Amino acid sequence: MVRLVLAVLLLAVPVGVFIGAIGIGGVLLPPALTWLADLDVHAAAGTSSWAFLFTGVVGTVAYARHQAMPWRFGGWLTLGAAPAAAAGALVNGVVPATVLWLFLAVVTAGSGAFNLWARPREARELCAPAAVAVGAAVGFGSALTGTGGPVLLVPVLLALGVPALTTIAAGQLIQLPLVGFATLGYAAQGSVHFGLGSILGVLAGAGTLLGTRLARKLRGRSLHRVASGALVGFGAFLFVLAFLPR
């Protein structure tokens, strides 16, 4: 058991790097907690949601310090995401895990492939009503799967033509209320291990700080392609994950 817990803790840093650099990576943590720490799928999602509160704080502060945080745009996304997150956490308890992973796989891999092979689109920013609607969909889906905000926000916004750095920075901000509401929903079901989640959050937060530095070096189309390629890889991982025995 000690070896298994150490493996999970070591995974937290690279997860944080992925979150800070390309906005995704949180999808790795719930399955790691399920298979390596022997948590059930709902406890893994709840504990991960608590850990992502740490990465959200670190990522938001880091991007804000370098004036890369789209506060207005991120605010509209958050307005939609916050209330939807609590509902997603509650529904998690009645949806089979296989369905959750397949849903994530289709969204991440499909969006990544679309963005890799489609012609470059003119950069755009969503209007306020569209941003609220996207935020609500992302908030519900992210809390439902226990993966934090960016893992769904990134593929959706990239597919809509939002610049990669804006997308990734907004993903840090949207995590804060999203995982806060999600954690409350999971805690009401007794599905959050706060001690383990806090340790994971501190380690993942350190990785997120490093990841934000990498993202600022990969601006423009390069960052867009790196993020899209990573989405395809994560999507393939999720397809396999959906059918592994638990």
Image: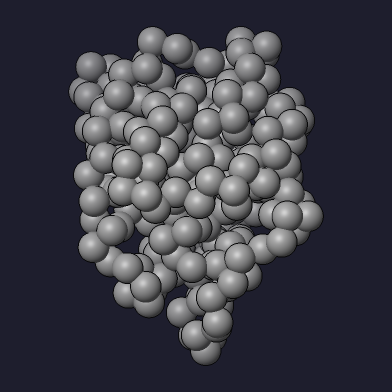
Q: Position of residue 58 (x, y in %)?
A: 35, 33
Q: Position of residue 125 (x, y in %)?
A: 61, 65
Q: Quadrant of residue 59?
A: top left
The scheme the figure's colours follow is: one colour
41 in relation to 130, above or below: above
From the viewer's perspective, is 12 left or right of 39? left
Q: Nearer the viewer, residue 94 or 184?
A: 184
Taking the image as drawn, is residue 190 in sight?
yes
Q: Nearer the viewer, residue 188 or 176?
A: 176
Q: Quadrant of residue 208?
A: top left
From the viewer's perspective, is 155 left or right of 195? right
Residue positioned 39% across, 27% down in the render: 54
Q: Quadrant of residue 12?
A: top left
From the viewer's perspective, is 136 left or right of 147? right
Q: Position of residue 77 (x, y in %)?
A: 65, 47
195 in relation to 110, above or below: above
Taking the image as drawn, is residue 28 in sight?
no
Could you tell me which quadrant the N terminus lies in?
top left
Q: Residue furthest bottom?
A: 119
